[in-house]
């Protein structure tokens, strides 16, 4: 009998046990979330390069107590309990510290799932400022073949704010659902390759309710946003992201994004970045759209996205009200509605980019939570981010 391989020692399973059928399940996601490109096709988003500053230990902060559940626990204990793979904290534009689980290296990329939506929306904001993309235009202005679908009478604004009256459920764990067919179209599940992402999206139908009335979290909207930006600009999304965001941002490491059988980017959830570069995106938003002394996104767009825009009424009618009772959703970003004015991007399995403008803190958290959605833990996480923001 042979001994354990280095891989098995580190991750607790063998590499050959990770399959397209189980890559999002625990414990396999501890490895697969850092190695999306070994499982599904991806496109590169190259960076300008440069040297990343060395890892900074969070030091004594890890031993500080937080009370986000029934009993107080240390920051380090909470990070482990919430299946954290990596954490980067910035304050006032300076990196305060990093934390990594034993199975993730400093500088490694990690999938950010639906924070991809928030990143894609920044690119939309940049193209809007350039006069290339009009959020008030009908979807059919850019994608005429959407005429027979749910999007036939929707605007790009409805897509951006998740207020399309779409007959579709985010049934993450139902193998027979339309969501499972969606996952096959993205090549994320076995059996894909017969229907492209674009073809799938254009089969979706609408509900009777008018668009714009209810916040409905439906990921195909955000893949459609990527298609809208590609049609508006004439460029592939990975090229757009590199030219408009990644290079001006000063991202140090290459990013990647999952693509389907036609090379269409999975802008709803397929982007992988390093924790430091994810934090840089948060700092860009905190600085009102400026990075490295250069304006990348209009300040008015950032303000609209993070504080003044979005429909409180649509949010009140939506399903995520327990997380942010006074929240709003604008341009794929969540406004918490809390007194500190915090806003965030959120992805399944515990991906968070949290910005507190009052304390000038940005927190990037990457995780491999066993469940895609854990409502109780999400509420604890928000409390944790608020506590951590005050500590640093």
Image (cartoon, rainbow, N blue to C red):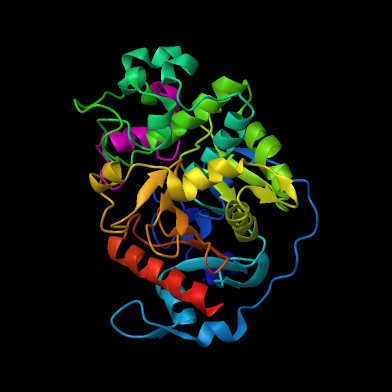
| Residue found at x 34% / y 17% | 152
| Residue found at x 64% / y 59% | 108
- The vertical placement of 156 against 386, above or below, is above
Q: From this viewpoint, which residue is outermost toward the left?
A: 208
- The vertical placement of 37 against 389, above or below, is above
| Residue found at x 25% / y 37% | 177
Give the image quarter of residue 209.
top left
Q: Is residue 2 visible?
A: no
Q: Does the magenta stretch include residue 192?
A: yes
| Residue found at x 52% / y 59% | 31
Q: Where is residue 187 in the image (x, y as percent from the top left)?
A: 45, 35
Q: In which quarter of the image is the C terminus?
A: bottom right
Q: How many labels does the image show?
A: 0
Q: Is residue 348 visible?
A: yes
Give the image quarter of residue 104.
bottom right
Q: From this viewpoint, which residue is outermost toward the right?
A: 50
Q: Which of 248 and 325 is in front in this view?
A: 325
Position of residue 329 in the picture relative to residue 168 (left or right): right
- The vertical placement of 247 against 160, above or below, is below
Q: Position of residue 25 (x, y in %)?
A: 38, 56
Q: Position of residue 114 (x, y in %)?
A: 45, 47
Position of residue 83 in the picture relative to residue 6 (left or right): left
Q: Is the magenta stretch mostly helix, strand or loop?
A: loop
Q: What stretch is highlighted in magenta?
A: 170-199
Q: Does the magenta stretch include residue 181?
A: yes
Position of residue 96 in the picture relative to residue 198 (left or right): right
Q: Which of 328 and 122 is in front in this view?
A: 328
Q: Where is residue 378 in the image (x, y as percent from the top left)?
A: 35, 63
Q: Which of 296 and 202 is in front in this view?
A: 296
Give the image quarter of residue 274.
bottom right
């Amino acid at each position: 009998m042979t001994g354990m391989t280095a891989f098995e020692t580190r991750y607790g399973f063998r590499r050959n046990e990770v399959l397209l059928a189980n890559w999002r399940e625990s414990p396999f996601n501890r490895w697969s979330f850092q190695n999306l490109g070994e499982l599904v096709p991806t496109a590169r988003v190259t960076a300008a390069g440069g040297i990343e500053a060395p890892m900074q230990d969070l030091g004594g902060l890890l031993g500080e107590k937080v009370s986000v559940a029934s009993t107080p626990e240390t920051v380090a204990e909470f990070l482990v309990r919430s299946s954290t793979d990596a954490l980067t904290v910035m304050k006032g534009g300076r990196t305060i510290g990093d934390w990594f689980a034993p199975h993730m290296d400093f500088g490694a990329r990690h999938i950010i799932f639906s924070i991809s939506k928030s990143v894609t929306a920044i690119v939309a904001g940049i193209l809007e400022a350039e006069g290339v993309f009009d959020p008030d235009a009908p979807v059919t202005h850019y994608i005429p073949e959407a005429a027979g679908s749910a999007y036939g009478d929707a605007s790009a604004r409805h897509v951006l704010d998740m207020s399309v009256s779409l007959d579709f459920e985010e049934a993450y764990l139902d193998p027979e659902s339309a969501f499972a067919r969606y996952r096959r179209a993205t090549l994320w599940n076995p059996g894909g390759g017969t229907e492209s992402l674009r073809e799938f999206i254009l089969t979706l139908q609408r509900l009777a309710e008018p668009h714009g009335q209810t916040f409905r979290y439906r990921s195909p909207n955000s893949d459609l946003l990527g298609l809208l930006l590609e049609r508006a600009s004439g460029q592939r999304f990975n090229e757009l992201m590199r030219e408009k965001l990644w290079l001006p941002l000063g991202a140090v490491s290459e990013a990647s994004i999952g693509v389907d059988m036609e090379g269409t980017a999975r802008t709803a959830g397929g982007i992988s970045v390093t924790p430091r570069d994810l934090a840089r995106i948060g700092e860009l938003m905190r600085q009102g759209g400026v990075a490295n002394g250069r304006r990348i996104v209009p300040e008015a767009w950032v303000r609209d996205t993070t504080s003044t825009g979005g429909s409180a009424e649509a949010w009140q009618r939506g399903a995520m009200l327990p997380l942010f009772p006074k929240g709003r959703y604008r341009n794929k970003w969540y406004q918490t509605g809390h007194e500190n004015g915090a806003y965030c991007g959120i992805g399944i399995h515990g991906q968070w980019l949290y910005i507190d403008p009052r304390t000038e803190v940005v927190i990037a958290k990457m995780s491999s939570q066993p469940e895609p959605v854990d409502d109780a833990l999400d509420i604890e996480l928000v409390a944790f981010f608020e506590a951590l923001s005050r500590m640093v």
